[in-house]
Every structure is written in structure tokens, then in C-alpha cells.
Image: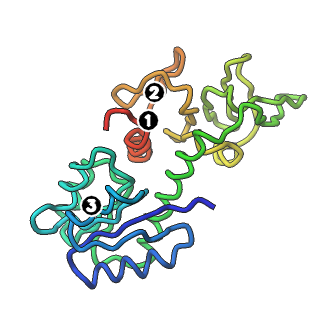
Amino acid sequence: MIQIRCMAVDDEPIALEKLESYIRRIPFLELVALCDSPMEAVQVMMERRVDALFVDINMPDLNGMEMVSSLPDPPMVVFTTAHTEYAVESYRFPAVDYLLKPFDFTNFQRAAGRLLKLAKVSNSMATTSDEDYLLAKDGYKYVNIRIAGILYIRGMRDYVKIHTEEKKPVIVSTSMSQIKEKLPPCFLQVHRSWIVNIRKVKEIERMRIVIGEERIPVGDSYRQQLMEFLRLHSLDK
């Protein structure tokens, strides 16, 4: 199981205790440290590996967003705040999620689930084998499709069209959700009708993904996930 090493940062003791309690209830979260100031948190991150931050925005001296912006290689971030204006402002940052205080365990689980999803994507970049195949029914025959050779998948009304490097598209009678379950996490759904192999992306410009000659749109509800993935894997951080 993937373990996400996380740290909670909040200047309010009660809020910090709640974060500690919630983190310890999630099996895939490993608590590295609890910090009551951003400066202490920065020092901890210089000494220990931290995969994810649960950080309050409104803190004295240095607020949560300023702290994250100052990090040369920031981890995944979940902002917490009691102020709605900060919650709106936090959307400008490539955060995984934000939690508006007072939040309950259900809200926390949602944010933790998003962290896990992104961690799986990151982990899959190094673990997907070129020898993995997807068995698909194409018309009256079954074909083996090399997963590493898939460029992108387009969902139509009653079927999906799998575009690969090796041959013409394979048409399969299935749904986007069903085929997505069979693919490794390096395949990102970026639109209700499109799944892309992130390893085959040539460029991304103005929320259009270029793979080969195809320009694939990014749906509004998928933008945050894509932006967080880019933040985690971009050389320009």
C-alpha cells in the first residue's frame, strides 16, 4: 500500500489536534510532524521527507500560501481555513484540495482520497511495465493491446476508441469508467470523453493536450487534477 508522509501546520492547538486525530484514522497517511508555525514546518521539510501538507492559510508572520510559495520543491498541499475569502484565493494555487473550517471527517477523507489518487499517479510513472497488455474485443475478435503503446482513448456514445502507436484505432464496446478501471494511474481522464496516456503528451497549451496531431480538450471539472499533476512533475517549480 502507498504510504503518504504528511505534516499538519496550524497555529491553533485545537485545529492541530483535530488534524492529528483525522490523519491517524486514515491507514495510508503517515504523520511525520505537527507544527504550530510555518517557519518550524519549513525547517522540518529541510530535514525529513514530506509528501503532503495540511496547512492553515491564516497564520501570523507567514501565511500558509506564502509558505508554500517559498518552497523550492513543494509537496502536495491541502489548505485549511476558516475564512471563505482565503478558500477562494487558494484556488489560484495548485492545491489538491481545501478544507473550510469547521470541517468534519467526511470532508477530510475526501481530501485524503485526492492525495492518494495523485500519489498513485506519481508512483505509476516508474512502475508501469512496457509488457503489460489489455485484452479487448474488437468486433468479432479479441486483440491484445500493449498498454504502454496507447496514446489516448476517446469515448463515443456506446463504445470507446483506443488510439495506439502501433495500429489503427481499436473500437471496443465498453464505457469510459470500465476501461479506466483496467488502466494504470498514468492514464488521466481529462474530459468526460477523453483519457490520455500522460507519457505520450507532447505539450499542453491553453488547456489543450497535444498528442501526435490530436489536440485534446481539458474539461472544467478535470482541470484541478491535471494542474496538480503538472505541478508535481514539472521541472519548473
Residue 99 at what x, y percent from top left? 32, 67
The quadrant of the rendering that contains the N terminus is: bottom right
Question: Residue 169: which quarter of the image?
Answer: top right
What's the distance in space between the residues labelled 1 and 3, CA to CA?
37 Å
Please state which amino acid type lies under the numbered disc 3: Gln
Residue position for label 2? 209
Q: Residue at x 15, y 68 (%)?
A: 59
> CB of mark 1 within 8 Å of CB of mark 2?
yes
Q: Which mark is residue 157?
A: none
Mark 1 or 2, which is nearer the eye?
2
Left or right: residue 159 versus residue 208 is: right
Q: Residue at x 50, y 68 (%)?
A: 29
Residue position for label 1? 218
Looking at the image, is mark 1 or mark 2 earlier in the sequence?
2
Left or right: residue 83 versus residue 187 is: left
Secondary element at tag 2: strand
